[in-house]
Amino acid sequence: MIEIPESKTVARQVRETLTGRTITDVFNATHPHKFTWYAGDPLEYPKLLAGRKIVGAEGFGAYVEILLEDDMRLAVSDGVNLRLYRPEAEIPAKYQLLLTLDDGSFLVFTVAMYGGIIAFRGIFENPYYLGAKTKRSPLDAEFDAEYFRGMLAGVKQNLSAKAFLATEQRIPGLGNGVLQDILFRAEIHPKRKLAALGDGDAERLFGTVKSLLTEMTGRNGRDTEKDLFGNYGEYAVLLSRNTCAEPCPVCGGSIVKEAYLGGAVYYCPCCQPLK
């Protein structure tokens, strides 16, 4: 799933690899997916995209946005897998969009559960997109301690740590995936109420949000997610479904997995006590 480290990584790879390439043809879905969302009629995408040159890419929140000539944009949201294939590669049988490029390579867009593939010119009037585009990111210098304290003060104090960080798009692109290691490193239980956080806890949480997302991004994303070329990221996730059967990397105790707020949470009861 696309979260901050992956959106930044894939956007950088698109800029470095595809800037200057021209889209030669556009192929619509071979496998219609009822939870794939488009801007307008996807049958119009060939007219919007074919013949246009890629001029850059941006990553923000859970979106990767490919910038084209004449202010055309092609954005993909969390849930969309974007892969670049070499000219000699076999074309996958199922996809939701495919773009061929002037060097023979091709971009394939697939959706597993849900996701948006959005072609538009100028601004896409969608609250999730606009929030991801305009809100401060933990990777920005402007996302500082004062800003974080304001976020904490602006919500109900009976919210849990998970609810504060990973719901309501308060921090676009900080989702349930990166949340686990953030709370583990900050030594905060996912169900712990904001009212129970002391000043030291809040400072530690802020610092961990900043430093860990920077580290994940610097390592080309998490090792549970793939990049533009189909390679896994280099940040070794500590707590996930892949590691929950292993002992806690700090104390050696058992990791707990629970369903909470629409997704699984993983935590160490010893290192992350629910005070």
Image (spheres, rainbow, N blue to C red):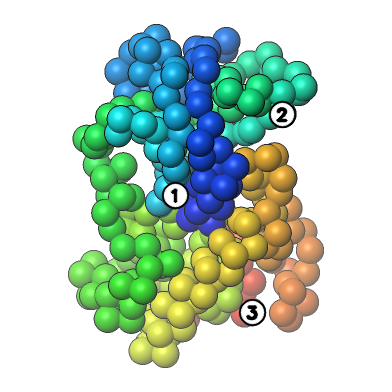
Residue located at (36% from left, 18% from top) = 48
Spatial separation of the CA atoms under disc 2 and disc 3? 48 Å
| Residue 18 quadrant | top right
Answer left or right for 172 relative to 250.
left
The quarter of the picture where the N terminus appears is top right
Residue located at (36% from left, 74% from top) = 141
Front label number (1 vs 3): 1
Q: Nearer the viewer, residue 16 or 268?
A: 16
Residue located at (70% from left, 17% from top) = 91
Task: Using the rendered image of the protein, determine whether residue 239 is visible from the camera's viewpoint.
Answer: no
Answer left or right for 147 relative to 107.
left
Dot 2 and dot 1 residues touching (CB under 8 Å):
no
Q: Secondary structure at mark 2?
A: loop
Q: Which residue is mark 3?
A: 270
| Residue 267 quadrant | bottom right
Where residue 76 appears, as percent x and y from the top left, is 44, 35
Q: Which residue is mark 1?
A: 59
Residue located at (51% from left, 36% from top) = 20
Spatial separation of the CA atoms under disc 1 and disc 3? 36 Å
Q: Secondary structure at mark 3?
A: loop
Q: Residues within 10 Å of mark 2 (few under 14, many from 20)?
A: few
Spatial separation of the CA atoms under disc 2 and disc 1? 23 Å
**What type is the residue that disc 3 sits on?**
Cys
With respect to residue 32, does 164 lie above or below? below
Q: Nearer the viewer, residue 237 or 269?
A: 237
Q: Earlier in the sequence, mark 2 or mark 1?
A: 1
**What type is the residue that disc 1 sits on?**
Gly
Q: Residues within 10 Å of mark 1 (few under 14, many from 20)?
A: many
Q: Which residue is mark 2?
A: 86
Q: Earlier in the sequence, mark 1 or mark 3?
A: 1
Residue 167's tag is none
